Image (cartoon, grey):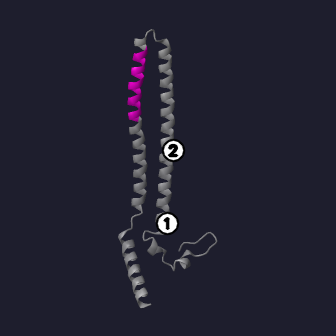
């Protein structure tokens, strides 16, 4: 039975039916919740780290482009610098979108894996069906 910190029995609150409410088991639900929270935390941390890395890289590229513009000898040179900067930026942002998508995909897969582990076993399903049937019979008798 699951107990609160003060020692009170949750079974009394739910009439001892926690196993019927969570046929996979309360511990399994708690474990899955902790694993999904951990996966979310890891995913968000990876997202933040990648955004920081990308922002720093793009700022450095922009600084280099400004330096090259300052050194341009003609309008043609300036246009070449701008075209290269814009072409590289488009490529970099597309690649970054792919990388961020991979981070979110990994987080989703990790969450799905944790939830899949929580899937009821056949024994738990049978137990849940029996408990539901017993509850139905008890309700009908009343």
| Residue at 42% across, 63% down | 118
Q: Residue furthest right?
A: 6
Total numbered badges shown on the rendered structure: 2
Q: Which mark is residue 27?
A: 1
Where is residue 24 drawn, in percent x and y? 43, 68
Q: Where 31 falls versus 97 (above or below)? A: below
Q: Residue 38 or 123: which is nearer the viewer?
A: 38
- Decide whether the magenta segment is chiefly helix, strand or loop: helix
- Residues rendered magenta in the picture: 78-95
Q: Where 127 falls versus 101 (above or below)? A: below
Where is residue 20 drawn, in percent x and y? 44, 75
Q: Residue 140 or 24: which is nearer the viewer?
A: 140
| Residue at 43% across, 44% down | 103
Check if residue 84 falls in the magenta segment: yes
Where is residue 30 drawn, in percent x and y? 50, 63
Mark 2: secondary structure:
helix
Q: Residue furthest top?
A: 73
**Labels 1, 2: front one:** 2
Please tell me in which quadrant of the rendered image residue 89 appears. top left
Q: Which mark is residue 45?
A: 2
Q: Earlier in the sequence, mark 1 or mark 2?
A: 1
Please tell me in which quadrant of the rendered image residue 76 appears. top left
Q: Where 64 falls versus 142 (above or below)? A: above
Q: CA distance from mark 1 to mark 2?
A: 27 Å
Q: Residue furthest bottom?
A: 141
């Amino acid at each position: 039975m699951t107990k609160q910190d003060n020692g009170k029995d949750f079974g009394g609150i739910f009439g001892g039916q926690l196993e019927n409410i969570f046929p996979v088991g309360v511990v399994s639900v708690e474990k899955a919740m902790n694993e999904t929270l951990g996966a979310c935390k890891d995913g968000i941390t990876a997202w933040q780290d990648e955004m920081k890395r990308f922002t720093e890289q793009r700022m450095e590229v922009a600084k280099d482009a400004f330096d090259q513009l300052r050194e341009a000898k003609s309008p043609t040179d300036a246009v070449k610098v701008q075209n290269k900067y814009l072409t590289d930026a488009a490529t970099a942002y597309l690649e970054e979108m792919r990388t961020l998508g991979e981070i979110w995909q990994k987080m989703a897969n990790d969450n799905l894996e944790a939830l899949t582990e929580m899937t009821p076993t056949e024994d738990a399903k049978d137990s849940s069906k029996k408990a539901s049937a017993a509850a139905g019979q008890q309700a009908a008798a009343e």
